[in-house]
Image (cartoon, helix red, strand yellow):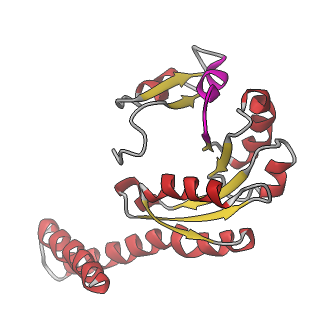
Amino acid sequence: DSGLAVEGVAVTNRTSAKAAAIDLPGVDSYALESHPEANATALEGARVVILGVKPAMIPGLLDEVAEFLEEDAIVVSVAAGVTIATMEGVIPNPVLRTMPNTPSLVRRGVTGLAAGSRATPEHVALVRAVFETVGAVLEVPEERIDALSTISGSGPAYVFFLIEQLTGTALRLGFTADEARLMVEQTFLGASELLAA
């Protein structure tokens, strides 16, 4: 939707059901379940490779796909807790570590970005551009990624908790569910817009 890439985007999933759920123009979606060479296919010609698997799976996945990575491919992890050194120990490519938060789903996210030892300013700029399509990007040294995640990663859950508490209070004060939702959601949206202004 951002227009950053109109074609040439490939994604892989383990199951056919998950792969089929990604039905977007310009995106090729492959299932390892039905196409065992899906990762190799998806990596062919890839300039930016984003790893979105469980943290414990990152080293094994990198080991598995290392031979299929293009020499100039930039590898980006969104896995919590997996260090740049761990990834650089498996592959020779430039590596960046990112930590986006859940509001990225509605393009209002915050993504922390840390560059590895082989990443050039050009690599960082390209990865930054990718993540700016879903919100703001904050470049930090790797040792600050966990602290960033504490604030922007966990922060939405605290906001939702406060919304739940205010909604419950409104219900106890006699407002209907629709009225409570309108008041609380509009209060948070309005306060955010006021803050931005």
Name the image quarter holding residue 132.
bottom left
Q: Of residues 11 and 103, which is closer to you in this image?
A: 11
What residue is rendered at 54% in x and 67% in y? Answer: 153
Magenta residues span 37-48
Q: Is residue 76 magenta?
A: no
Position in image of residue 99 (x %, y %): 59, 60
Give above or below for 75 relative to 18: below
What residue is rendered at 38% in x and 70% in y? Answer: 160
Q: Of residues 149 and 170, which is closer to you in this image?
A: 149
Q: Of residues 42 and 7, which is closer to you in this image?
A: 7
Give above or below for 110 relative to 92: below
**Is residue 31 toward the left or the right of residue 192 in the image?**
right
What residue is rendered at 47% in x and 25% in y? Answer: 28
Name the image quarter holding residue 178.
bottom left
**Is residue 36 toward the left or the right of residue 126 in the image?**
right
What residue is rendered at 60% in x and 18% in y? Answer: 33
Give above or below for 98 relative to 168: above
Quarter holding the C terminus is: bottom left
Residue farthest to the right, as pictured: 89
Position in image of residue 157 (x %, y %): 46, 69
